Amino acid sequence: MAAAWSKSLLTTVRKSLIIIFYRNPELGKVKTRLAATLGDDKALAVYLRLVNHTQSITKDLIMDKMVCYSHHVDTEDCWDNTTYQKQIQKGNTLGDKLEHAVKHAFDQGYQYVGVIGSDCFELTEDILKNSFLKLQTNDAVIGPAKDGGYYLLGMRKFVTEFFKNKEWSTATVAKDTINDFKRLGLTHFVLPVLSDVDREEDLPKGLLNKLR
């Protein structure tokens, strides 16, 4: 995979953007389903570890990177200002916010755009690289999550349908998005199914002991 990535750098890197959807880390306002069983303090601690993981797998990517903040842009946080572009999420629903961020990226001239959250310990730098490699020969790439959502959506053209008529945060989002690909006649690649962290049972073994 590393060799294939290297051969593609000259044609893709300067045209590629990875967008990270990020919720400002406030006690009682992150990982609320996790907090229902662990409490707000531990839920926040888990979230911060997820954020650190997401940062660690994206910071060395040679492509451009953008963090989209839920409430306010923080220029003094863990996301280095020289490494990550920063902007606020705009829109009412998650679909609205995703659509705005992706459309803005294509309007800025990017040709390969991927969106991730900060909820997946299983996501790796190699999976991110591979997703952009697959966009060279596919119209879209999706990384399904075990809960029915997706941890990554990549595309090489803006398609508004990807963000419409979805029941966000339900078990049908990935399936409905793949149906969009098929209905619109778009070629697509499906990445491995990974687990997002939403509930206590989603946590890696041993992590809770480290938080005690």
Image (cartoon, rainbow, N blue to C red):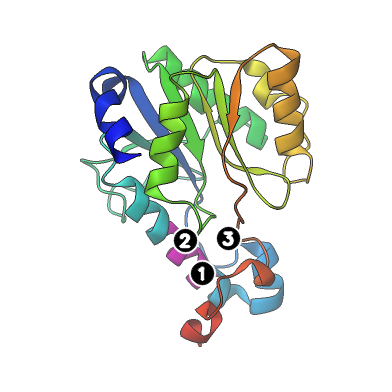
Residue position marked by numbered label 1 in the rendering: 46
Which one is closest to the eye, mark 3 or mark 2? 2
**CA gap, disc 3 to disc 2?**
11 Å
Disc 3 residue crowd, few under 14, some 14–19, many 20+, Cα 10 Å = some
Q: Where is the N terminus found, in terms of image quarters? A: top left
Which one is closest to the eye, mark 1 or mark 3? 1
Magenta region: 44-51
Q: Residue at x 59, y 34 (%)?
A: 142
Whether residue 127 sits left or right of residue 100 in the image: it is left
Which of these two is toward me, 166 or 194? 194
Relative to 63, does residue 208 appear above or below in the rendering? below
Q: Earlier in the sequence, mark 1 or mark 3?
A: 3
Q: Secondary structure at mark 3?
A: loop
Q: Residue at x 32, y 31 (%)?
A: 4
Q: Earlier in the sequence, mark 3 or mark 2?
A: 3
Mark 3: amino acid:
Val
Residue position marked by numbered label 2 in the rendering: 50
Q: Residue at x 66, y 23 (%)?
A: 162
In the displayed orientation, state which residue is furthest to the left. Answer: 82
